[in-house]
Amino acid sequence: MNRTGTRHVSSIQDVRAELVERLRARSVEIEDAIFARVQALSAPVESEDAEYRAGLRATVAEVVSYALVSIEQGEEWSEPVPSLVAAQARRAARSGVGLDTVLRRYAAGDRLLAEFIMEEASSLPNAALRQVLRAQGPQVDRVMAAVAAEYMSEVELMRRSPAQRMAERVQRLLAGDSPLDAAELGYELEGWHLGLVVTGARPDVAARTLAAGLSRPVLVVLRGDDVAWAWLGGQEELAVADVDRYLSAGVLGDVSLAVGEPRQGRDGWRLTHQEAQAARLVMMRRPQPLIRASDVVLLAAVLREETLARSLHQTYIVPLDEHGDADLVLRETLRAYFAAGFNAATAAAALEVDRHTVQRRLRKAEEALGRLLHSCHAELAVALRLEELGESASPPLPGR
C-alpha cells in the first residue's frame, strides 16, 4: 500500500469516529424513537408479561449501542450479539410473540437508525457514507439471524418440555383464544383466584410452598430461572394479608411477590394475573418483598405509557424546579401532605415544622403549578411517585 492508500484508510476511520460521536450525542433520542416504532408493532400478549415489556426497552438500548460500535469499528468487526438480545428473543418465544413480529421490529429499528445516520452524515464525504451504510447491512443480518436462532431454540425446548407446554397452554388461555378446560390445567377456573408474579431463587418452589402453607390449590408457570406466574385458587376468597404474613415468616426463601386482587371465575383468573403483572412493573423499579396491585394501579398504568409519564413530569414536577433550592422542600412537603390525608397539621408534625409553614409551602406549590392542589392531587401524587422511581430513566434489566 502506498501513502495515499494509508491516508484513505485513516480518513475513513476518522469519518466513522466522527459519525459515531454525533450519534452517541443523540443516543437517548434515537432509542426513544426506535422504541416508539417498535411498540407500534405490538403483539396483544405483551401486556401480560412485565419482564418482556421491560426487556424490550432495554434491548433497544443494547442494540443501538451494538450498532454504533459496529459503525465505529468497520465491516471487519465481528462480535457475538449481546446476551440481553439473545435473552429477549427467548423471552419473546415464551411470551407467545411471533417470530415475524420480532424480526419486523429489528428491520424497522434498522431503517430508523439509517435515517439518523443520514441526518448526521450530511456533511461527511459521500464515499465514506456509502461505506458505512454498506457495512451496516451484514451486521443487521447477523443480529437477526442470531435472534431467529435463539427464538427457534426456545420454541424447540418448549415442545420437548412438559412445563413449557403447560406455559404455552396458559399463555393461550390468557389471550382468550383457547378452549382449554380445567382438567388440562389441573386447576379449577370457576372458583376464587389470587394472581402472583414470584421473583427470586426457585420461584416455582416458593409458589408451591406458599400454596401448601395456605392449603390452597395452585397453578404455577415457570417463566425463566427466576420468575414464575402463579395462581392460588379455592372456593373461598383468599386475603392478600394472609400471603403477606406467610411471606414475612421467611419460609419461602429469597423471593418477592407482586400480587393481584382476589377475583372470581375465568375472567377473574385473567384479571388478577394482569393486576399482578402491573404490580410487577412497579416492583422492577423499586424492589420490595411484596407489592399489591391496588396500591399502585395508577402508577402502573402510567408506567405502561412513557408519553403519560413525561407529560406528568413536565406538568407537575418541572414547575417546582423553578424555585431553586426550595424545590426539594416543596416536594417533601407535598409528599407529607398527601401521606397525611391532606391534613396540614399532621403533615407539619411529620416534617417537624409548624402548620403555617406547611400552608405557606402548599400555596407556593400552587403558585408554581398554576392550579389548586385539590384539583390535581391525584396527578401530582403519581408524578411525585414516578420521580421517586427515577422514571426519567429506563427501567432496570429484567431479573436484576
Image (cartoon, rainbow, N blue to C red):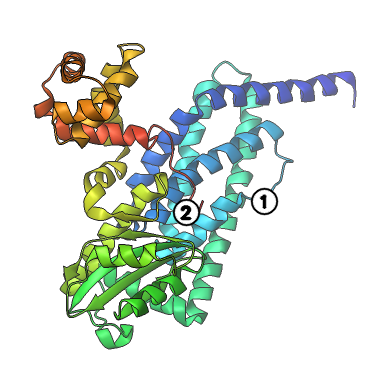
**Residue 87: horizontal and vertical position, in percent?**
54, 57
Q: Quadrant of the N terminus?
A: top right
Q: Secondary structure at mark 2?
A: helix
Residue 322, by quadrant, is top left
Q: CA distance from mark 1 to mark 2?
A: 18 Å
- Vertical relation: 345 (above or below) 41: above
Instruction: Name the foreground residue: 153 vs 213.
Output: 213
Is disc 2 surrounded by few (<14), some (14 to 19) or many (20+) residues within 10 Å? some
Write the residue at 25% across / 63% down.
241
- Looking at the rendered structure, the kind of residue marked 2 is Leu
- Vertical relation: 64 (above or below) 234: above
Residue beneath disc 1: 80
Residue 340, by quadrant, is top left
Left or right, residue 36 beside residue 162: left
| Numbered badge on residue 103 | 2
Is disc 1 surrounded by few (<14), some (14 to 19) or many (20+) residues within 10 Å? few
Q: Secondary structure at mark 1?
A: loop
**Residue 113: horizontal and vertical position, in percent?**
50, 35
- Looking at the rendered structure, the kind of residue marked 1 is Pro
Q: Is residue 307 visible?
A: no
